[in-house]
C-alpha cells in the first residue's frame, strides 16, 4: 500500500490477511527496545511488513511514524500486564508487573499513555512526536481522556 | 517369485530410507533417525573405530550386516543398500541399453578404494567419504533431491491448505551449495550403467568390496545343476557380471543374490542353496585375492595425508570457516566426517552448508555455518544428535552458551549506526547471548561485541540489514574446539 503522507516510507508491503481483514486489532506487548526506545502499538506494526530492514536503514523512527499515517489499526490493545524494563526487545531482562491493559481507537493515544508506565513522557519518543505532526491522534496526556476500569 | 520379493523388499527399504530422511527435521522426535542407515554401515563403524581407537558402543547393526555378508555374500548390495536400489531404478528409468558386453574388468578397482579408504583413515585424514555408499546416496538426496521437493511441497501446500499440518519437510525453502553438482554426479553414476550395469557397485564401491571379500566364503551361494543347457541367458542378464564365461562359473564376490538368473533359467537349473561346510574349495570359483591392490593402496594412502597437511588452506583456513557447535578439533573432525549431509538436512535455519575448499582439500563437503543464509539457533542441538560418527559431538542446549564457534566482529565503516548515526541496533536486538551491547555516542546507540559472551552463532550477521555482506560478521578467531567427555 502507498503512504502518501509518509516522508521516508512512501509505500510498504503488508501481509495479505491483514489487507483482506474487515477489522484490524493490534495487540502489542509493552517493552523497551534498544533502537526504538519502546515497543507498543506503532512499533508493533513492523510485524506485518515485509521489508523491515529498510526501516532500519532509512531511519527507524521516521518510518514508524510514516506507517501510521497510512495504516491505522481499528483498535489498539496494549498488553501491559507485565512490562520488560531492560534488555529489550528480546530479553531476558527486568520485568515489572503493572497489571494494566490499554485500549484505544487512537493508536497514538494508547502509546502515549503506555510510555508513562516506563516513566517516560510521550515527547521523548521521536516516532510519537513525528506521527503527531504528520497525522491525527493525540499524544499530549492532558488532552487524552483516560478511563480506568 | 524371489525376484518380486526382492524388488518389494528393496522398495520398502528405500521408502524407509527416504521417510527417515524426511523426518530428520524439526522437531526431530522420531525414535529412529536417518542416521540409523549410516550407523549400520560397517565402513562407518570401522572409521569410528580407527579414528577413536575404541570400539563404538552401537556395534549391533554393523555386526549384523557383516554376519549377513558371511552368510549371504553381497546380499546387502542386492536387497538393502539404498544406493544400489537407486541405481536399479535410475538405470531402468534412464537407460534403454543395459548390460552391453563391455569386457572391461575393473572390478578390482573397488579393493583399491576400500584399502585406500581404510588406510587414509588410519593415517588420520580419511577419504572414506568418497566411496561409502550410504553417505553418498544420503548426501545426493539431501543436497540435490530435497531442495526442489521442498519447494514443490510448499507450492502444493499453497494450493491445498489442508496439507499445512503435514510437515515432513522444513517449513522454509532450502538452498544448498553443490546441489547441481551432486545431481550430475548421481546421473553420471547411473549413466555409467550403460557401460556395465551397476557400474558403481561392481567397480567402485568400497562397501561392496568389503562384502565381496566376505562373500567369497558365503554359506548361501548360487549353484547350477547338470540340467544346465549352457544357453548363456544368465550370463547376459546378470547385472553384476558375476557369471563369467560359462553359466556354471559364479564369481561369488560379485553375486548380489538378486536371484534373476534363478528366475530366468529355462531349465530351472539355477538354485541358491546353503553350502555344506566342507574344506574342499571349488577351484573354478576363485579369482585371485586382491593382495597387490592392498600394497598399492597402502602406498598411495600414505601420500594423501602429506598432501592434505601441506595444502595451502590447511595452513591458512578461510577466516569465516565456522564449524557446527561441539565439532571435534579440525583434524579429527575432517577425518571422522562422512559428509552424509544429515547435519545440513536437520539444521533448522539452513545455515549449515558443505564446504568447498575453505579448510583445504581435506575439508571438502564438510559442514560449515554460513550465517548469511542461516544462524545457529540458540535452542537447537539437532546436528549433534544426528551426526553418525560423532564428528559433531552431542551437546545440550544449556551448554550452548559455552560452546564458542567463532566471534562476531563489527565493520564500523559499513555499520549504519557507526558511519551514518542511524538508529539500528538490530544485532543487539537479536543477540541471544547478550554479547552485543550498545553505548549512546553522538546521539545514537552504537553496537559493540563482548568477546567473552559471543559464541559466534551468527544471528547478528543473518539479521544485519546491510546486504549483501553484513556489517557484523562472524569469524573463526574466537573458536574453541575440544574433544568432550
Image: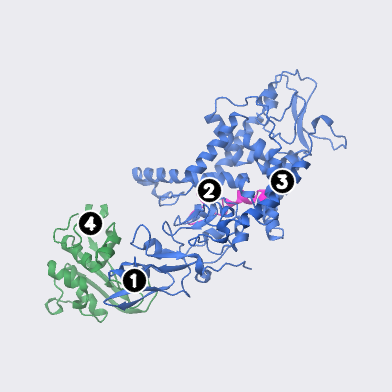
Chain colours: A green, B blue
How far apart are the alpha carbons under marks 4 and 1? 23 Å
Residue in front for this viewpoint, B5 or A52: A52
How far apart are the alpha carbons under marks 2 and 3? 34 Å
Which residue in the protein does label 4 denote? A12
Left of B157 or right of it: where is A41? left
Left of B177 or right of it: where is B392? right
**Relative vertical location of residue B179 with respect to residue B91 in this rendering, above or below:** below
- Per the image, label 2 sits on a secondary structure element best described as helix
- Per the image, label 1 sits on a secondary structure element best described as loop
Which residue in the protein does label 3 denote? B297
Q: Position of residue B2 (x, y in %)?
A: 66, 31
Which label is found at residue A89? 1
Residue in front for this viewpoint, A87 or B26: A87
Chain letter belonging to callout 2: B
How far apart are the alpha carbons under marks 1 and 3? 59 Å
Q: Quadrant of residue A73?
A: bottom left
- Per the image, label 3 sits on a secondary structure element best described as helix
Quarter in which the N terminus of chain B is drawn: top right
**Mark 2–mark 3 CB contact (< 8 Å):** no
Left of B403 or right of it: where is B207? right
**Mark 4–mark 3 CB contact (< 8 Å):** no
- Per the image, label 4 sits on a secondary structure element best described as loop
Which label is found at residue B21? 2
Q: Residue at x 41, y 58 (%)?
A: B372
Residues at marks 4 and 3 on the same chain: no
Q: Residue at x 75, y 30 (%)?
A: B250
**Residue B145 in sight in this render:** no
Amino acid at each position: 500500500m502507498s503512504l502518501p503522507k509518509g516522508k521516508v516510507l512512501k509505500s510498504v508491503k503488508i501481509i495479505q490477511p491483514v489487507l483482506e481483514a474487515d477489522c484490524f486489532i493490534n495487540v502489542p506487548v509493552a517493552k523497551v527496545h534498544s533502537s526504538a526506545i519502546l515497543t507498543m502499538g506503532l512499533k508493533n506494526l513492523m510485524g506485518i511488513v515485509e521489508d523491515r530492514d529498510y526501516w532500519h536503514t532509512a531511519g527507524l523512527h521516521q518510518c514508524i511514524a510514516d506507517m501510521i499515517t497510512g495504516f491505522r489499526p481499528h483498535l489498539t490493545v496494549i498488553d501491559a500486564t507485565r512490562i520488560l524494563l531492560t534488555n529489550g526487545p528480546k530479553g531476558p531482562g527486568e520485568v515489572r508487573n503493572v497489571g494494566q491493559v490499554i485500549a484505544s481507537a487512537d493508536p497514538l493515544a494508547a502509546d502515549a499513555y503506555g510510555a508513562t508506565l516506563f516513566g517516560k513522557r510521550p515527547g521523548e519518543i521521536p516516532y510519537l512526536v513525528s506521527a503527531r505532526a504528520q497525522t491525527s491522534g493525540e499524544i499530549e496526556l492532558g488532552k487524552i481522556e483516560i478511563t480506568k476500569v | 517369485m524371489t525376484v518380486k520379493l526382492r524388488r518389494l523388499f528393496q522398495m520398502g527399504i528405500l521408502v524407509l530410507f527416504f521417510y527417515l530422511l524426511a523426518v530428520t527435521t524439526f522437531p526431530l522426535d522420531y525414535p529412529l533417525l536417518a542416521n540409523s542407515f549410516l550407523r549400520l554401515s560397517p565402513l562407518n563403524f570401522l572409521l569410528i573405530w580407527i579414528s577413536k581407537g575404541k570400539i563404538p558402543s552401537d556395534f549391533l547393526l554393523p555386526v549384523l550386516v557383516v554376519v549377513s555378508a558371511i552368510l549371504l555374500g553381497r546380499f546387502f548390495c542386492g536387497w538393502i543398500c539404498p544406493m544400489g536400489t537407486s541405481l536399479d531404478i535410475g538405470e531402468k528409468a534412464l537407460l534403454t541399453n543395459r548390460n552391453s558386453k563391455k569386457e572391461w574388468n575393473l572390478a578390482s578397482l573397488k579393493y583399491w578404494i576400500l584399502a585406500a579408504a581404510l588406510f587414509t583413515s588410519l593415517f588420520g585424514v580419511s577419504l572414506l567419504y568418497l566411496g561409502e555408499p550410504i553417505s553418498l546416496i544420503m548426501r545426493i538426496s539431501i543436497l540435490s533431491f530435497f531442495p526442489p521437493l521442498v519447494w514443490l511441497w510448499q507450492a502444493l501446500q499453497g494450493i491445498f491448505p489442508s496439507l499445512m499440518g503435514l510437515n515432513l519437510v522444513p517449513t522454509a525453502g532450502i538452498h544448498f551449495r553443490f546441489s547441481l553438482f551432486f545431481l550430475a554426479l548421481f546421473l553420471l553414476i547411473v549413466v555409467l550403467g550403460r557401460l556395465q550395469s551397476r557400474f558403481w557397485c561392481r567397480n567402485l564401491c568400497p562397501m561392496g568390496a568389503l562384502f565381496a571379500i566376505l562373500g567369497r566364503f558365503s554359506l548361501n551361494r548360487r549353484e547350477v545343476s547338470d540340467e544346465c543347457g549352457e544357453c548363456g541367458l544368465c550370463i547376459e542378464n546378470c547385472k553384476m557380471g558375476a557369471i563369467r564365461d560359462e553359466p556354471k562359473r559364479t564369481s561369488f564376490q560379485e553375486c548380489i543374490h538378486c536371484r534373476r538368473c534363478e528366475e530366468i533359467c529355462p531349465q530351472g537349473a539355477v538354485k541358491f542353496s546353503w553350502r555344506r561346510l566342507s574344506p574342499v574349495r571349488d577351484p573354478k570359483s576363485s579369482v585371485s585375492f586382491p593382495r597387490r591392490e592392498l600394497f598399492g593402496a597402502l602406498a598411495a594412502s600414505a601420500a594423501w595425508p602429506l598432501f592434505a597437511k601441506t595444502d595451502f588452506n590447511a595452513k591458512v583456513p578461510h577466516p569465516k570457516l565456522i564449524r557446527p557447535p561441539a565439532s571435534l578439533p579440525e583434524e579429527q573432525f575432517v577425518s571422522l566426517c562422512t559428509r552424509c549431509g544429515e547435519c545440513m538436512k536437520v539444521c533448522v535455519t539452513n545455515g549449515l552448508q558443505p564446504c568447498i575448499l575453505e579448510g583445504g582439500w581435506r575439508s571438502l563437503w564438510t559442514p560449515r555455518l554460513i550465517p548469511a543464509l542461516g544462524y545457529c539457533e540458540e535452542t537447537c542441538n539437532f546436528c549433534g544428535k544426528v551426526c553418525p560418527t560423532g564428528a559433531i559431538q552431542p551437546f545440550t542446549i544449556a551448554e550452548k552458551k559455552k560452546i564458542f564457534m567463532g566471534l562476531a566482529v563489527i565493520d564500523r565503516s559499513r555499520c549504519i549506526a557507526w558511519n551514518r548515526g542511524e538508529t539500528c541496533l538490530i544485532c543487539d536486538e537479536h543477540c541471544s547471548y547478550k554479547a552485543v551491547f550498545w553505548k549512546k555516542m553522538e546521539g545514537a546507540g552504537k553496537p559493540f561485541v563482548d568477546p567473552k559472551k559471543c559464541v559466534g552463532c551468527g544471528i547478528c550477521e543473518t539479521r544485519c540489514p546491510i546486504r549483501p555482506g553484513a556489517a557484523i560478521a562472524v569469524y573463526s578467531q574466537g573458536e574453541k574446539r575440544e574433544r568432550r567427555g
